[in-house]
Each structure stands twice: as structure tokens, then as C-alpha cells.
Image: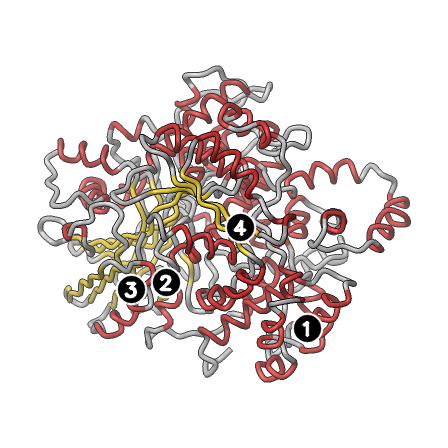
Amino acid sequence: MCGICGKMIWKNGEINEEAMRRMLAALVHRGPDDEGIYTKRCGETSIALGHRRLSIIDLSAAGRQPLANEDGSLQIVCNGEIYNYRELREELQQQGHCFRSLSDTEVILHLYEEDGIACVGKLVGMFAFAIWDETERTLHLVRDHAGVKPLVYHWDGRSLTFASELKALAVDPTVPRELDRQALEIYLTLNYIPAPLTIYRNISKLSPGSVLTVRGGTVHEWRWWDVSGMARAAAATTPRGGGVSVTERRGVNCAPPEMNDTNTRRGGGGDDSFLPLVGLARADNRSGNSAPEAKRHGSGEAETPLRAMSSYRLDFEGAKKALYSVLERSVQSQMIADVPLGAFLSGGIDSSIVVALLARNSPRPVRTFTIGYTDLPMYDERAYARVVAKMYGTEHHEIPLSSREMISVAPEVLASLDEPFGDSSAVPTYVVSRETRKYVKVALSGDGGDELFAGYRMYRGEELFRSYRRIPSLLRKLLVEPLVAALPSSREAILPERVRRVKKFLKGTRGGTPSERFLLWNELFPAADRRRLLIDDGFVIADNVGAGQHGEDLQGGAEIFSAAFARYRAGIAGNDYLNRMLYADFSVSLPGDMLRKVDAMSMAHALEVRVPLLDHRVCELAFALPGAWKLQNGRGKAVLIDACSGLLPQELHHRPKWGFEVPIGNWLKGGWRFLLDEYLSRESITKQGIFRPDFIAELIAGLFSGRADTSWQLWNLICFQAWFYNHFDQRSDF
């Protein structure tokens, strides 16, 4: 895990090496072990690549980046790990390639020599890398399948600047920083800003599973992998009985579209014309490009998830066996490291499965780490983690924290965010990463299981909705909904928390389509509240989506989720609504929220976090399975729990989903009150000129009166304000 940055200037521009060093300095927390810079003028093109190193594999100087091939025509900087690098290295050596290091990154260089950028289809890992091809005068930026590792960039028609984090771009004087009010509204809606948007109008996130190809004055972002491809393959071969038929998908189809004079702006990969999908050509071939199949190494053929199914019966029982096999292989592959390794253990299903498989394949006791609140038993999950740790004899580290200790760390968390991010679980993630780093340099986590196997309560919402609408409309409107609305709700006790969940469910039922309901269940500030909150300073909130028909303005994220639903649906027979919801979460929320949080909080302490459940082979198999196998009789993760039942203690089999919750309301009314005073005072809000102070005052009053649970909305605003004053140049035009 490292930090990367770079710049490519077309038409005889000069690289500012001092600016490059400032960018690297902004990334020092990601890679405290070493740094390197490569600069060169190639005809009318200038290139610079920078790297901050966190040494995990090949700790020697030979692993220092940027790395070059034998003749220096290729240069690479990489953030992340390639888990199958040993197998690929062996095959490349048999083909005559010579290696000068034991680094996994060097494998990418030699693969590129064989296959060009199509080599990305052979990589198993989490990665974001930049590779400069001097012969072709071409720069490729690449992001991994699920978007575990981040990459942001700025393109102005003449130069491209990129980095692992926005804070590195912010120190480059040539990169403008203009507040994107559309991104701000989406942040207020979702609590995060999904790709390709960033908080800055002129800076974009590279989308997961995408490549940005730059040659001269031409830029294309195109998608090389999309897990919905496996869903399409499964749909095309699924018998009426619901089982999965074995079929062979073609190799990863990841040849770039032909370069032309058209510049792609702001994540052009969102356009299907730039989507060569995994192993599946679009029926209508809209792109006009027939992407050739990449050359295959022997190991690549063995990675096909549906092939893994061929060893088993093709029913639910067979799927369980295949899933267990793919999960175990994923954990095994992610155990490679030349430094100490451990695992996060929350006591939930996902982290417990990862720890169990890790312990079964480790020659020594696994180090595990869990966090708990000593004075808030409702939020303390240490007891569940202890059961798993005892079962597998792990070297278990508990991190007991009082509310006072958690409150004291809030300013550090806020200072580490280079973009507004309102997920309050960032606070405990920051602390557990800090404490874990004292013992190990690499930790495995269970992130991703909820989005693949329907672990969140929200996924049951659509099923409950279909039952709820059978209640006569008059009874719902005159009795059920007014009664629930009158009940107090909060996150501070079990009963009010359950009332809060019911209110959230009823809010979602106002949506007229699955994608609208999905948004409403995810929504933080409803459209009416956003209108009351934001000052209309030349910025017009888009027209209502669904207004009139459903009585709800769904703008501010609706388009993002509806596009994800449509992308998943394309070419799929039937109506697997659950997998559509999962795909929307997987492609939008997971990289925008969960993975963003883990990367930012762990790298603040130079801790590498790996996510075995998001190995692309696990993801592909998960989306090849029917949604009905994941959610059974209201039980989420059914196929996952059943597949790994032998690994889990009985106490975990039917424990309710809780999540990495924090008592944000308690803290805002107590020790975090200073954050309200500092960031949301009437004086500071008025001076800033973005929000209406009267509405914020109402939110604060509602929190302290107990009339409404506004804690998450207030935390969302605090996070924005902290980012604004810590990272945004107030002299910029917004």
C-alpha cells in the first residue's frame, strides 16, 4: 500500500519537480518508508511519476518505485498488491522475462510487455497504478475491480495530474479547486461523494474497474471489468429451477477503445460506449469496438468462478461448496507479506469468516484486533469477537475505549479527510487502525460481505414493501403511518432504535420504483430539507425526479442509483430485484463509502488493509447466484452463512446485524458539543454563505429536545465544515 502521484504535459510543457515533491509530501502518511520520482521529456510530452512507499513485499531497495523494465521504455508506480504475482512471475520467466526484484509491481511491467494494457485482466489484487509507455507516448491509469484503492485526476486538455488522494492534487498550483455544488448536494443526500464526482468541479475519481488512457491531447476513461457481466452470464444459463448452470465465460475483455480526438470529461466511463465488459460483448455492440480477447496464461483460465462450480452439483448445496472454495482461496492468496500480518475481528459474520479461514491456513497464531466501548454496552461487540478468538486460538487484542477517549480523537479524524465524508464509523475505524498498526503492518478485514450477500436490513425492505402494500391504503395512511410518526426514535436505546428503523422503512415506501425506494432508504437529507439548507446562490437544484407522481423529489443521487439499476438490468432476463439492489450498493456505495472510509482511516496510520471478500472471483461468483439464495425468509447472507457454518460458533449464526455503529447523538450532546459550537455556529455559517443558519439551528434544537434524531445530519454538516476549513482555499470561486 502506497501513495502515487504524477503529471503528464502535452505540447512542450515543463514538469515542476518542486510541485511533485510537494505532492509526495502530502502523501507521506501512505508511504513513510521511502520515496521516488521519475521525470523525462519525450518529444513534445513531459512525464513525471512519484511514489511514496509502504514496504510490504520485497523490502529491499530493489522494490523501490518508480520501477522500469529492462530498456527503460516502461515506468510504473503502483498502490496496492498483486496477490497472484508469484504464479504470473513464474510463467513470465518461462517465457524469457528477467526480473531484477522480488516485487509484485515488477510483474505488471512484464505482463504489459506481453499484452499491453489488456494485462490488467490477469491481475488478482487491489491496486491503483500508473504505467508510462514511452514508445507509444501513452499513460494509463488503472483502478482495481471493486475500487479498493483510490485514484483521482485532473485533465485540462493539455495536462493530466493524478494522485492517490485529493490533498496531493490540492498542493499543485496548476490544478484549480472549484467547489462542485452538485457533488455537495449528493454528499448531503448520501453522506459521501461517489465516483466519478469529487467535491471539486475540475477533479474526478477514476471509477472502479476502469482505465484512463491518455495519449497526446486525447483522454478516454473506459471500463475493463464490471461484475454485472457475471450476472448476465448466469441469467443466460440459469435453469427454470433457479440453479446455476456451468458456462465458460471468455477471458477478460479489456482492450481499450480506439483513441480519437474526442476528450472524455468527468468520468466518461459512465457511458456504456466505453464499457468492454467482462467476457461479454454487448448484444448491440454500441461501442463500435470489438475488443480482442487478451492472451491468456495458464493460471488465468483456472480463475473462472463458474468453472469452480463445475466440480459441484449446480444447486444450493453446490453453490455453498463452490463459495467456500473461492473464499478460502482468496484468503490464502492474501496472506502473502514480508511483514507481520493480522486481522480485524468485530465479531460479525464477515470478519469471523475471514479470521477462521486465516487461522486454518496460518502456521502460527493469527493476531486479531477488536474495539469496544467500555461505557456503552449497546454498541460493544467484544463478547462476540472473544468467542471467535477463543475458538481459533488467536493472539487477540481488545481495544477498550471510553466515550471520553473516542471524543478526543474526533479532531484527528476530521483533519485526515481530504473530501467531505459523513460516515461516523470512520471514528472507530481510525482508532482500531491506529492500535492495530502498533503490532502489524497488514490487516485483513471482512468488508464487502454485506454488499455481496445482502447483510444490511435495507435489503429486506423491498421484500417487506411487497407485504406492506397489501394493507389497505386507507388503513396505512390513517392509522399505521400517523402512529409510527408520533413515536420517539433515536439510536440511543434499543426500542427507540427499532422505531427509527420502522420510520426509515415507511419513508422508503413512498418511492414508486425499486431504485427510488433504494435511494429513500439511503437518503440523509431529503430534497425538501436540502432546499431549506442550501442557499440558492446561482445554483439551481435540478428538477424533481418523480415529483407529482410519487410526491417526493428524488434528485441528488437518484440518477446515480437508477443508472446502476439500469446497467445491471441490461441484458438480464427476469427481475432479480435483490441482486439489482446489491449491484447498486456494490458499484456506488461500497467504493464511495465503505472502501473510502477504510482506505482513508487505515492509511492515516500507514496500515495496509486487505479485503478477501472483494476478491473479484468471490464477487463474480456472488453475483452469479440468485438473490433468493442470499436472503431467505428474512435471513440475510443465507448462502454465505450456510457455506461457512462449520467455521462459525453457534452464537454468531443468528445474531442480528448491528454494524460498526457509534453513539453519535450521545457524543454531540456531550463531549462533542464543541464541534457544534466550532463548525455550526450561526456566525460561522453566515460568514461562509453556503448554508442557511436558521435550518441548522432547527436541527440542533431537535437533537437536544429529543423531538428528532438529527445526529447524523449534524455530523454530516460538521464533516463538511471541517473539510472546508482544513482543506478548501476560501479564495477559490464557488
Report the residue that reaches farthest toward the top. 313
Instruction: Tell me which corner region of the image, top left, top right, bottom left or bottom right, holds residue 294.
Output: top left
Contact between labelled residues 4 and 2, with CB atoms less than 8 Å apart: no
Q: Element under label 2? A: strand
Q: Is residue 50 above or below residue 676?
A: above
Q: Element under label 4? A: helix
Tag nearer the camera, 3 or 1: 1
In this figure, which residue is indicated by the disc labeled 4?
589
In this figure, which residue is indicated by the disc labeled 1?
696
Which amino acid type corresponds to the residue marked 2 in the rendered image?
Tyr
Which amino acid type corresponds to the residue marked 4 in the rendered image?
Ser
Q: Which mark is residue 236?
A: none
Distance Cα–Cα, label 3 vs label 1: 46 Å
Precedes in sequence: disc 3 or disc 4: 3
Q: Element under label 3? A: loop
Distance Cα–Cα, label 2 vs label 4: 20 Å
Q: Is residue 351 above or below residue 55?
A: above
Contact between labelled residues 2 and 1, with CB atoms less than 8 Å apart: no
Residue at screen point 29% across, 38% down: 336
Which amino acid type corresponds to the residue marked 1 in the rendered image?
Ile
Tag nearer the camera, 1 or 2: 1
In this figure, which residue is indicated by the disc labeled 3?
217
In this figure, which residue is indicated by the disc labeled 2?
153
Distance Cα–Cα, label 2 vs label 3: 15 Å
Residue at screen point 53% across, 65% down: 183
Tag nearer the camera, 4 or 1: 1
Instruction: Tell me which corner region of the image, top left, top right, bottom left or bottom right, holds residue 164.
Output: bottom left
Q: Is residue 338 left or right of residue 400?
A: left
Which amino acid type corresponds to the residue marked 3 in the rendered image?
Gly
